[in-house]
Image: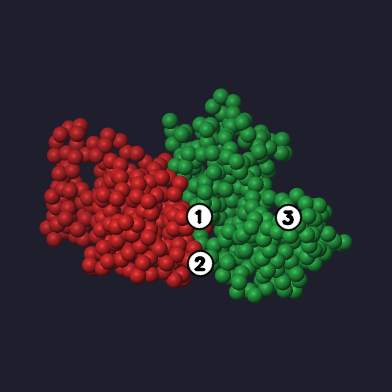
Chain colours: A red, B green
Amino acid sequence: MMYDLIIVGGGPAGITAGIYAVRQKMNALLITKDFGGQLVRKAGLIENYPGFEGISGLDLIQKFEKHLRKFSIDIKLDQVAKIEKRGNIFLALTQSKDKRESKTVIIASGADPRQLEVPGEKEFIGKGVSYCTLCDAPLFSNKTVAVIGGGNSGFEAAIALDKWAKKIYILETGPEVRVEKENQEAVKKTGKVEVITSVILKRIEGEKFVKALLYKTRKTGKEMTLAIDGVFVEIGYQPATSFVKGLVDFNERDEIKVDSETFQTKTPGLFAAGDVNIGKYKQIVTAAGEGAKAALAAYDYLRK
Amino acid sequence: MMYDLIIVGGGPAGITAGIYAVRQKMNALLITKDFGGQLVRKAGLIENYPGFEGISGLDLIQKFEKHLRKFSIDIKLDQVAKIEKRGNIFLALTQSKDKRESKTVIIASGADPRQLEVPGEKEFIGKGVSYCTLCDAPLFSNKTVAVIGGGNSGFEAAIALDKWAKKIYILETGPEVRVEKENQEAVKKTGKVEVITSVILKRIEGEKFVKALLYKTRKTGKEMTLAIDGVFVEIGYQPATSFVKGLVDFNERDEIKVDSETFQTKTPGLFAAGDVNIGKYKQIVTAAGEGAKAALAAYDYLRK
């Protein structure tokens, strides 16, 4: 069976592309390992997706998924291992060894959280080390925790943790934090957050669970130990793009280069929408808008 | 008082820009004659704004407006007559002779419906001639109506009218219609729509109310008369951009030229989002996405 469009990814960009594709009567398949992308890991209420004054990431993605499933689109819960182009046809090979053909492809596979890559990190995943503040914050009631990363996601994680933890450290490798004013003020208001900059992380220690974080600061060079019960990793995202190498160009952050009007990559018929591409502004509503534009551009490409 | 940002327009692009501006702690003013833009004139349910499976334009815009008003943004119900730039400062002059100053401006004033410009059109506005199918369709229960325009909006108007009218003509000036398949099929299904192409409209006639539409076709050159009770004008939109002449460049459709990543015009600090700009794809979710990007770009511009 030959599809008009294969969409890779089930976050806001992929789901919106799916809604638009089906409404254009395109014969479409969406492949994703799960629905939500970064939305499900989002800490706190989402207050900037127009139409919803305050909604959790999980609730919003459930609405998105339900909206998509209203239409007749094929959905395959699997992960794409490789995309190839043969002549005018794209081939999507999945991890379960499935092979699907399509005339166009939209990559909307988002980005995965970056890892610290220090000793103890992998060992204590689920035992104090978390990449999902929203999911895990309630486990740290009246505990002391560290958030790694002094950007907006780090500060938003600290704000979310305020409801649970008794003491929160934010650790930043740079000499200063780079954060929206609103987040800065909200963190200050908690009265329980301590920000430490110029940090070089050494390792995470513990027994059954995390007990301490060891680091140096660039200022003193002295090794310091923080007694903590949890580590929340908020140091950005790695675009999920390895399966499409050869067909697209990347920038220095491994983001896919696209035309910012049609979101087409350097390969005709291959598009990239949302967090995977070079776009500067990465928001739920911008990802959704890009998904719609990419689907309409794929439709235009097919008509020619 | 000097604003950080003035937003012109209260549709999806302007409202989303407002939400993002306030959350960035920008001191912002939104000027609009009313909320909604084209949304309030939208016929039928909106099924392609992710998160809402089916919602009327009025309901959606009310949610958008309520969402915006949750934040502390200045709102002025007025119309902008002119925007000037003096040094680094923008001046917005309104029809009520108000004068406001700002460091940046986002134009999100949308587009107004194009008029037929034939005799009888102005005379019978509200007496059978309508630019708002959704608002006026229920007045034409069991009547015969004509929709002018064989594009998607014309076909969607006919679909909306199906619930009310007993007979519907769609008149198109071109030799064929250019319509999404889904709309074409839905129109066919009504069994009461007749499409006439290559039409040259002559005039609208009536007494108290519209009674007839006179036209020629390019094929025969003969003048024809349709006995009808209503005329729905669906021939596209004219961007509302006259107040900003001199500061921006236009394309041949009077749409404002912008960079498609930041939505900045040729004037630094002046942005244009949504239906007013040259963007090819004009949807609710793409307008919202562009509003968010323009507000974040205005914030970046102010930081420098």
Q: Which element type, helix, strand or loop, lies under badge 2? A: loop
Q: Residue at x 43, y 33 (%)?
A: B303
Q: Residue at x 33, y 59 (%)?
A: A89
Tell which circle, 2 or 3, labels the residue nearer the N-terminal end. Answer: 2
Q: Are marks 1 and 2 on the same chain?
A: yes
The CA span between labels 2 and 3 is 39 Å
Chain letter of the residue carrying label 1: B
Which kind of residue does numbered mark 3 sit on? Ile
Q: Horizontally, is A237 left or right of B273 in the view?
A: left
Q: Position of residue B283 (x, y in %)?
A: 53, 54
Quadrant that contains the N terminus of chain B: top right
Residue denoted by label 3: B200
Residue A48 in view in this figure: no
Please tell me whether residue A157 is drawn above or below residue B224 in the rendered image. above
Q: Position of residue B189 (x, y in %)?
A: 60, 74
Q: Horizontally, is A15 left or right of A98 in the view?
A: right
Residue denoted by label 1: B285
Chain letter of the residue carrying label 2: B
Residue denoted by label 2: B53
Chain letter of the residue carrying label 3: B
Q: Horizontally, is A133 left or right of B231 in the view?
A: left
> Within 10 angstroms of label 1, few (less than 14), some, or many (20 or more) residues?
many
Q: Residue at x 45, y 64 (%)?
A: A26
Q: Which element type, helix, strand or loop, lies under badge 1? A: helix
Q: Are marks 2 and 3 on the same chain?
A: yes
Quadrant that contains the C terminus of chain B: top left
Please tell me whether residue A240 is drawn above or below residue A257 in the rendered image. below
Q: Which element type, helix, strand or loop, lies under badge 3? A: strand
Marks 1 and 3: which is nearer the front? 3
Q: Residue at x 67, y 47 (%)?
A: B33
Please tell me whether residue B144 is drawn above or below residue A238 in the rendered image. below
Q: Position of residue B25 (x, y in %)?
A: 48, 41
